[in-house]
């Protein structure tokens, strides 16, 4: 079958999945059946999901789990986490329980500024452009008053607009660099709408500016777009206790543990190969909560990883210290989140997650997300510096293999018992399953 297709977006959903089944599968009816089996039986809800994106053919489910007992700034939370990776939710819950009896997590929002830019080409004297901007700066704000009116009522709006000369990077390249406050919304549409108006105002004002030559009046706007790098939208989360208080059943010598833990963090601070995996573990916690609450985890990822490289080398997002017998572990990350608008208001489970978190403000959600990342990192480093990461992970991996091979309850009991004393690998488990079935 010819796999090129014309007018696909105009097909009905039924036509789309039938075409896919016929084009790519030896058993089209089975393929179509799989897709339809994940449709929501509630037609109204399915229609809602269908309209989130284009060319929808079915729903792709991720588990939504919860990690209870998070004590954050004196308040207990049960944190929702949407993620497919084994042991992430369990690890977060263990960290929550561990720190709940040691004072809990402290979290503070340090700043909430967001950035947008109009990128443009100007051919002329930079000093004349600077004079032009100084004389017309107020007009950029005035021109967006109808856009910013409602945001200003909620305490947000445009904080500042700057002209930036980037000609040392690209010939004739300049920016309007704007700072925004979007309160409880993610603010992407708001910021981009403001920026596009800035671009219109820039071109109109330049065209009539008497001190510009004809060439200078012809400013070329390349693009107007928000930035997902938000180094001034920062949240800090930390835990702290006496080193002696770190003792528990897996930490028999808290002094040795604290020193080893500190060294593990220091390695991630200086070694990029380790830092990437270290930070990936942090993002296991962050992304899971961001996704569960209907926020944009790709934007959060991009901004946080850029922040991890802000000093010229990719480095750890978390840090630790031992001073005067006190162990402290903390994280500072840029996170732009919303609790109103977008999927937070449309997706039933995102609404559920936010209600379970007692309808947090954007600042409160920033704190919760940062704590989830720190908790995940603590759990990973605790495992790495004590029993090793594979002990807990392989238990979950074993469960996945047993599900893959559709083992019976009797087989499952025999296999779990066997691998309590034997190393779990995919090959070893498959061989043991084969052995059981051959002998029965």
Image (cartoon, rainbow, N blue to C red):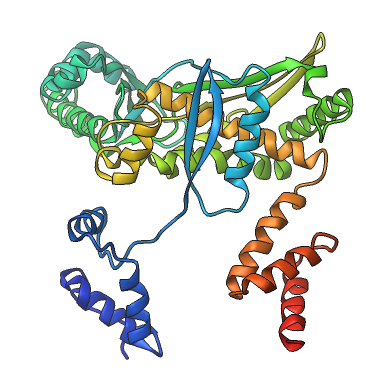
| 154 lies above or below 418 | above
Q: How many dots with numbers?
A: 0
Residue drawn at 29 percent across, 45 percent down: 348
Residue most extreme to the front: 410
In this rendered view, identify the residue nearer to me: 294 or 166: 294
Residue 209: quarter of image: top left
Residue 321 in the image, given as x and y percentages of width and height = 75, 19
Quadrant the C terminus occupies: bottom right
Residue 359 at x, y = what percent?
Answer: 34, 27
Asked whether 299 or 123 is in front, the reply is 299
Is residue 298 left or right of 40 when viewed as pictured?
Answer: right
Please determine whether, in this image, residue 437 is positioned above or below residue 153.
Answer: below
Q: Is residue 109 above or below residue 359?
A: above
Horizontal relation, residue 77 to residue 52: left or right:
right
* Quarter of the figure with residue 91: top right
Q: Residue furthest top?
A: 324
Q: Position of residue 109 (x, y in %)?
A: 47, 17
Can residue 122 be seen at all in this image of the molecule?
no
**Left of 346 or right of it: where is 284?**
right
**Nearest to the observer: residue 128 or residue 244:** 244
From the top left corner, tell me how far across and down residue 132 is, in percent: 23, 17
Instruction: Tell me, yes or no, if residue 34 can be seen here.
Output: yes
Is residue 225 depicted above or below 135 in this figure?
A: below
Image quarter (top left, top right, bottom left or bottom right) of the N terminus:
bottom left
Residue 438 image-quadrant placement:
bottom right
State the residue at coordinates (39%, 41%). Answer: 296
Residue at 34% over, 41% down: 350
């Amino acid at each position: 079958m010819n796999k090129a297709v014309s007018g696909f977006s105009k097909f009905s959903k039924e036509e789309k999945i039938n075409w896919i089944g016929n084009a790519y599968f030896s058993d089209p009816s089975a393929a179509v059946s799989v897709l339809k089996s994940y449709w929501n039986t509630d037609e109204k809800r399915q229609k809602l999901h269908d309209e989130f994106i284009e060319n929808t053919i079915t729903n792709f489910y991720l588990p939504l789990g919860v990690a209870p007992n998070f004590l954050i700034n004196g308040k207990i939370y049960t944190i929702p986490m949407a993620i497919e990776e084994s042991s992430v939710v369990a690890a977060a819950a263990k960290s929550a329980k561990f720190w709940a009896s040691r004072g809990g997590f402290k979290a503070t929002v340090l700043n909430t500024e967001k950035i947008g830019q109009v990128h443009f080409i100007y051919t002329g004297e930079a000093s004349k452009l600077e004079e032009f901007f100084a004389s017309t700066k107020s007009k950029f704000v005035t021109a967006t008053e109808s856009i910013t009116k409602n945001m200003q009522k909620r305490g947000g709006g445009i904080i500042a607009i700057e002209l930036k000369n980037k000609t040392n990077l690209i010939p004739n390249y300049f920016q309007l660099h704007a700072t925004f406050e979007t309160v409880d919304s993610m603010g992407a549409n708001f910021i981009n709408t403001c920026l596009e108006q800035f671009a219109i105002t820039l071109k109109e004002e330049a065209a009539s500016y008497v001190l510009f030559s004809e060439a200078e009046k012809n400013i070329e706007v390349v693009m107007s777009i928000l930035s997902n790098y938000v180094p001034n939208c920062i949240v800090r989360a930390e835990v702290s206790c006496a080193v002696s208080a770190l003792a528990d059943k897996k930490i028999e010598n808290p002094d040795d543990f604290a020193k080893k833990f500190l060294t593990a963090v220091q390695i991630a601070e200086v070694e990029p190969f380790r830092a990437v995996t270290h930070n990936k573990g942090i993002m296991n916690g962050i992304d899971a909560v961001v996704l569960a609450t209907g926020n944009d985890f790709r934007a959060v990822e991009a901004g946080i990883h850029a922040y991890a490289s802000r000093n010229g080398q990719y480095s750890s997002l978390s840090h630790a210290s031992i001073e005067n017998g006190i162990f402290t572990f903390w994280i500072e990350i840029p996170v732009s989140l919303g609790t109103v608008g977008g999927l937070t208001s449309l997706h039933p489970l995102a609404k559920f997650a936010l209600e379970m978190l007692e309808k947090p403000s954007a600042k409160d959600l920033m704190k919760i997300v940062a704590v989830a990342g720190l908790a995940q990192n603590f759990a990973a480093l605790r495992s790495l510096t004590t029993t090793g990461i594979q002990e807990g992970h392989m238990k979950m991996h074993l469960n996945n293999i047993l599900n893959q091979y559709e083992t019976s309850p009797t087989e499952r009991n025999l296999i779990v018992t066997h691998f309590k004393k034997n190393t779990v690998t995919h090959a070893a488990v498959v061989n043991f399953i084969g052995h059981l079935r051959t002998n029965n």
